Amino acid sequence: MGPRGSTLPSKQYVSILSQNLRGFNSAKEAELILRLTERQIWAACLQETWRHGDDVHGNEGFTFLVHGLAEKVCRRGSQGVAIALSPDPTRAARAAHPHD
């Protein structure tokens, strides 16, 4: 319930993080999962992943949606973004779309 006598739902808050990664590999993914869990972050917007192509994968209950250039344009990589969803929004998305 919301404010006294109100039928409105109470406000719920989530924490969303934005982070420039300067490259994203399995070691950084493991570290990110640890930090997001410690800080109870609901979702993270990740920039400069330096990955190419598109990918959706899970790791320890988290879902990672990754988008990058079709092909690398330099040796170290460039650009690329990702969204990391913690277990709560991952479960909510699966419940909302059970056949996907």
Image (cartoon, rainbow, N blue to C red):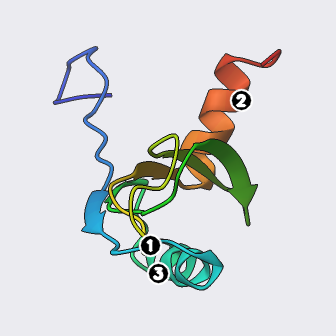
The residue carrying mark 2 is: 94
Marks 3 and 1, how far apart at CA: 34 Å
Residue drawn at x 57%, y 74% is: 29
Residue drawn at x 53%, y 51% is: 52
Q: Quadrant of residue 6?
A: top left
Q: Is residue 76 above or below residue 11?
A: below
Instruction: Tally the numbered discs.
Output: 3
Q: Nearer the viewer, mark 2 or mark 1?
A: 1
On the image, the x and y values in percent for residue 31 come to 53, 84
Q: Is residue 58 above or below residue 26?
A: above
Q: Check disc 2: other Cα within 10 Å, few if <14, some if 14-19, many if 20+.
A: few
What's the mark number on residue 28? Answer: none
Q: Nearer the viewer, residue 23 or 64?
A: 23
Q: Is residue 11 left or right of residue 93?
A: left
Among numbered discs 2 and 1, the one appearing first in the sequence: 1
The residue carrying mark 3 is: 38
